[in-house]
Image (spheres, grey):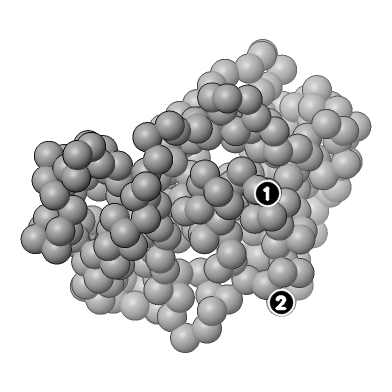
Amino acid sequence: MALPVFDYFAPKSIEEACAALASNPDGAKLLAGGQSILRVMKFRIMAPELLVDVKAIPGLRYIEGDADTLRIGATSTQSDVLRNDVVRKEFPLLAEAIARIATTAVRNTATIVGNICVGHTASDPSAALLALDAELVVVSLEGERILPISEFFVGHMSTSLDAAELVREVRIRRRNDKPGMAYLAHAGRAAMETPLVAAGAIVSTRNGICSSATIALAGADETPVRISRAEEALIGCKLDDVAILKAAAIAAEDCSPDTDVYASGEYRRRLVGVYVRDALRAAASRVA
């Protein structure tokens, strides 16, 4: 399917990119790797008049950090993130989420930031970053702000970014409580597909008792979501099957999956219970 007609602009700086967005607030969209937005354009889900390509802007492709925070630049590819030693060691949930995306060729071009900015409910990086409680550094001609990713997704294919804003950086807090993490997805008939449902889980324990828990879902609601009631059900419990099955049942009850051509909402709800259970089991087995 052919792309719709659009204008193209390759700015040389963040300021030029923001100015281009501000000059056409209703018709301009950002292009980074292009793997996400070009796909939705082919299906006429989006039809921007102008694509602002930030890929060549200097200084946006990096993965670096200090003792407290890992920072991922806007044009870092998914392969960059997947290969990063800190990501693989400290944030295996993110590595697992990225590893299941499409193919190596796609990951070599696609970016984490580009993927999440499309706002798809079944985005693997979105659910993983939501589980990790990431923050986004958002910039515009007016300046810079820090946006918790929990406030980023507002609807299917919709985010809280203003029309003239772009995400410059993803920040993930490094933890010293040595949690266990896991990310599992049901991909349907082919491994390259967007997941019908995916679950990310992070748990920490103290003296064998769960002290913190995070459960994030993709494909199970209008946006990627955290299931706070299921998280709270685990706190203060031993991470055995009794607690895990209870949390999984709550997650299945509290999500609101849609029916579409790929699966019914009820089928997705059942998958949520299965994948939250399995992700929690895997995460619990990895607690240091």
Q: Residue at x 50, y 53 (%)?
A: 92
- Give residue 189's mark: none
Whether 127 is drawn above or below 170: the answer is: below
Q: Residue at x 80, y 23 (%)?
A: 15
Out of 151 and 141, give the one closest to the viewer.
Answer: 151
Q: Where's residue 90, x and y in %?
A: 52, 44
Looking at the rendered structure, the kind of residue marked 2 is: Met
Residue holding disc 2: 1
Whether 77 is drawn above or below 248: the answer is: above
Out of 177 and 248, give the one closest to the viewer.
Answer: 177
Q: Residue at x 51, y 69 (%)?
A: 194
In the picture, the quarter occupied by the N terminus is bottom right
Does any portion of residue 35 appear in the rendered image? yes
Residue holding disc 1: 84
Left or right of residue 265, residue 202 in this image: right
- Secondary element at tag 1: loop
Looking at the rendered structure, the kind of residue marked 1 is: Asn
Image quadrant in which you'd find residue 281: bottom left
Out of 219 and 105, give the one closest to the viewer.
Answer: 105
Left or right of residue 280, residue 89 in this image: right
Which of marks 2 and 1 precedes in the sequence? Answer: 2
Q: CA distance from mark 1 to mark 2?
A: 35 Å
